[in-house]
Amino acid sequence: MKSFKIFLSILAILITIVIIDTLQAKIFNNSTMLKIREKINENSYIDKGILVNHYYCNDNKNITTWKMEKYNCPIDQNEKLEFSNYSKVIENIIIELNIPEYWKYEELSKKDNYKFELKIYKDSKSGNATMYFLEDKFSVCGTGLTTEKLKLNSGISATIGYYKMENPAWEFIKLDDPYSNIILINNSLNENDSNEILELIKTMTITPILSQDDLYN
């Protein structure tokens, strides 16, 4: 019984420390003492606490958020980012993306259930987002699946899926009709890289290639 009381006392002290540490981070917009630091880019990083995250952004803006809140550091307007203007013709459409210079991409050979595959990754191919041009429409189901509507910068609508109980990062993005056979799958990207590549995906444009008959109708 005595050892159990000691255990409860230690647990209460630890919980109190976490609460005080979290409150000071939120009140004073600081990082917590108990944290893991993760680099976002050359000028930005995130301190991951137990209940909150603190972002140091390259525009000198610092912000403390609760764990479940989504936040992306704004792009520093003084930082000149260079992009690769990726373009691919698939059947009767042209797919275009603006890929930042610090992300890499690789086209892979097609397989039986899809006509095209594009792997986009930052540091390692083991963590990537892969775009597929499928033979048929994409469908998915599962316990804990949450979906939200997403609008690309070009106006194309899409559906973004999460399994939030397992991972706060998005799992898949499916374009809506008439492009519902185009999907992007998140393969082991961390939450910050997932948010960053989401902004990349929003730059996607799709342009139909008109036939001679279409031009004269």
Image: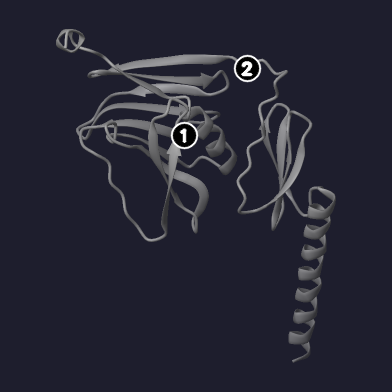
Looking at the image, which is closer to me, 37 or 2?
37
Q: Is residue 164 above or below residue 156?
A: below
In this rendering, the label closer to the viewer, 1 or 2 = 2
Q: Quadrant of the C terminus?
A: top left
Label drawn at residue 65? none
Residue 2 visible in image: yes
- The location of residue 81, given as percent across then percent down, is 62, 17
Residue 33 visible in image: no
Q: Is residue 73 above or below residue 26?
A: above
Q: Earlier in the sequence, mark 1 or mark 2?
A: 2
- The location of residue 1, given as percent across then percent down, is 74, 92
> Which three-letter amino acid code belongs to the residue tagged 2?
Leu
Instruction: Using the rendered view, name the quadrant where residue 83 is placed.
Output: top right
Q: Is residue 116 above or below residue 71?
A: above
Q: List the residue tagged with mark 2.
A: 81
- The location of residue 138, given as percent across then percent down, is 27, 41
Q: Residue at x 75, y 81 (%)?
A: 8
Looking at the image, which is closer to me, 34 or 200?
200
Q: Is residue 182 left or right of residue 92?
A: right
Label drawn at residue 128? 1
